[in-house]
Image: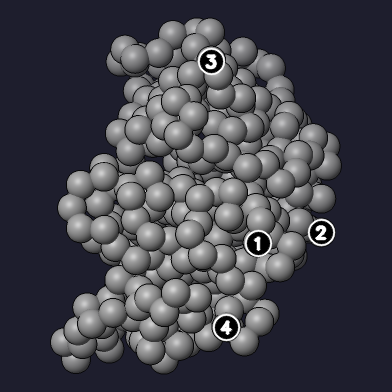
């Protein structure tokens, strides 16, 4: 691939939204030690991608400009760097790219330790979709003390924004672990979330949904909070004695509440989860996809030449499942 160019989408500074995205032609990257070069077949967008553009991780991310966004990819290995032993050219893989970058392109390099083989039954879109969202859902449930292997005490779990990227995996993983799941979503997605396995589904715009009240009167042992704007007081009144709220969105108010709940030794806790790349967990999640125990719901697909439309849809935050870009 040396000397060849590829199409990619990038931006050159903070802010600007869709208008700041530029379609460019740049050199194809080369894999370094312990890296593989992937021909991207699908890339999945996450809210963190446009939040990084807005400066939520400034000054740490992007690590440099211009920046090619998106971390979740799936495709075919074209070349391996020195030291790579798990993969060879022609392997179909799913990968989490470094530094939240590189996915909106025709080719990308990934670290071997964050790349896993993709089962034949799984499409590139399904594989790409589960990367960050699936890992976040898994890590949130584990942080809440929810066993996912079917052992231990059955817990009552609330998942907010359950029809979104992280939420739809959190519902499925909690049910695989044998737990009771209540979920919130918009009216148009109630049946969809029931089909994912949720025991109870609340329309968040109804009085009961806005109050997070379980139809069966249950108190929640764990809340996986994938929605912005819900107050601690609203969660607190619905928690069991030692209930935990595991919060994924990044905001100053959430971090302050988390701190207060720790320093005051409150029995009810709010826990922050920051996504941690983990190859072994990703391999397990992709394996569950291959076994048909998990499914990726694809909201919409866009070609790379229309990546700006995918970006705009992601910012709107109303997708059911995952938004996919295909080079």
According to the picture, the residue beneath numbered tag 4 turns out to be 208
Q: Is there CB contact under 8 Å for labels 1 and 4?
A: no
At label 3, counting other C-alpha atoms closer than 10 Å, the crowd grade (few under 14, some 14-19, many 20 or more) is few
Q: Is there CB contact under 8 Å for labels 3 and 1?
A: no
The answer to which of 318 and 25 lies nearer the viewer is: 318
Q: Of label 1 and label 4, which has the lower sequence position? A: 1
Q: Which mark is residue 190?
A: 1
According to the picture, the residue beneath numbered tag 2 turns out to be 19
Q: Residue at x 38, y 65 (%)?
A: 157
Q: Of label 3 and label 1, which has the lower sequence position? A: 3
Q: Give the CA distance from mark 3 to mark 1.
A: 31 Å
Q: Is disc 1 placed on a helix, strand or loop?
A: helix
According to the picture, the residue beneath numbered tag 3 turns out to be 120
Q: Give the CA distance from mark 2 to mark 1.
A: 34 Å
Quadrant housing the N terminus? top right
Q: Is there CB contact under 8 Å for labels 4 and 3?
A: no
Task: Tell me: residue 300, above or below residue 108.
Answer: below
Q: Is disc 4 placed on a helix, strand or loop?
A: helix
Where's residue 102, x and y in %?
Answer: 58, 38
Q: Give the CA distance from mark 4 to mark 2.
A: 39 Å
Q: Residue at x 48, y 19 (%)?
A: 119
At label 1, counting other C-alpha atoms closer than 10 Å, the crowd grade (few under 14, some 14-19, many 20 or more) is many
């Amino acid at each position: 691939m040396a000397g060849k160019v590829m199409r990619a989408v990038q931006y050159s500074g903070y802010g600007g939204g869709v208008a700041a995205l530029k379609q460019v032609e740049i050199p194809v990257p080369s894999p370094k030690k312990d890296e593989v070069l992937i021909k991207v077949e699908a890339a999945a967008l996450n809210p963190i991608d446009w939040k990084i553009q807005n400066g939520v991780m400034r000054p740490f991310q992007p690590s440099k400009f211009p920046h090619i966004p998106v971390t979740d990819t799936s495709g075919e290995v074209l070349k391996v760097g020195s030291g790579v032993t798990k993969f060879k050219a022609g392997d179909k893989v799913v990968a989490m790219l470094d530094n939240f970058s590189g996915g909106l392109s025709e080719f990308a390099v990934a670290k071997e330790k964050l790349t896993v083989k993709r089962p034949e039954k799984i499409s590139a879109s399904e594989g790409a979709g589960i990367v960050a969202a699936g890992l976040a859902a898994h890590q949130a449930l584990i942080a809440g003390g929810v066993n996912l292997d079917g052992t231990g005490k059955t817990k009552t779990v609330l998942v907010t924004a359950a029809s979104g990227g992280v939420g739809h995996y959190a519902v499925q993983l909690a049910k695989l672990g044998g737990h009771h799941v209540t979920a919130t979503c918009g009216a148009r997605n109630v049946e969809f979330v029931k089909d994912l396995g949720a025991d109870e589904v609340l329309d968040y715009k109804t009085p009961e949904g806005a109050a997070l009240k379980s139809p069966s009167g249950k108190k929640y042992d764990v809340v996986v909070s994938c929605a912005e704007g819900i107050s601690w007081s609203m969660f607190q009144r619905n928690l069991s004695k030692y209930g935990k709220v595991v919060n994924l969105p990044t905001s100053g108010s959430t971090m302050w509440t988390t701190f207060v709940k720790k320093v005051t030794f409150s029995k009810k806790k709010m826990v922050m989860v920051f996504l941690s790349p983990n190859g072994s967990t990703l391999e397990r999640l992709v394996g569950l996809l291959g076994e048909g125990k998990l499914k990726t719901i694809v909201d919409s697909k866009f070609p790379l030449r229309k990546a700006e439309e995918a970006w705009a849809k992601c910012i709107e935050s109303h997708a059911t499942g995952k938004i996919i870009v295909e080079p």
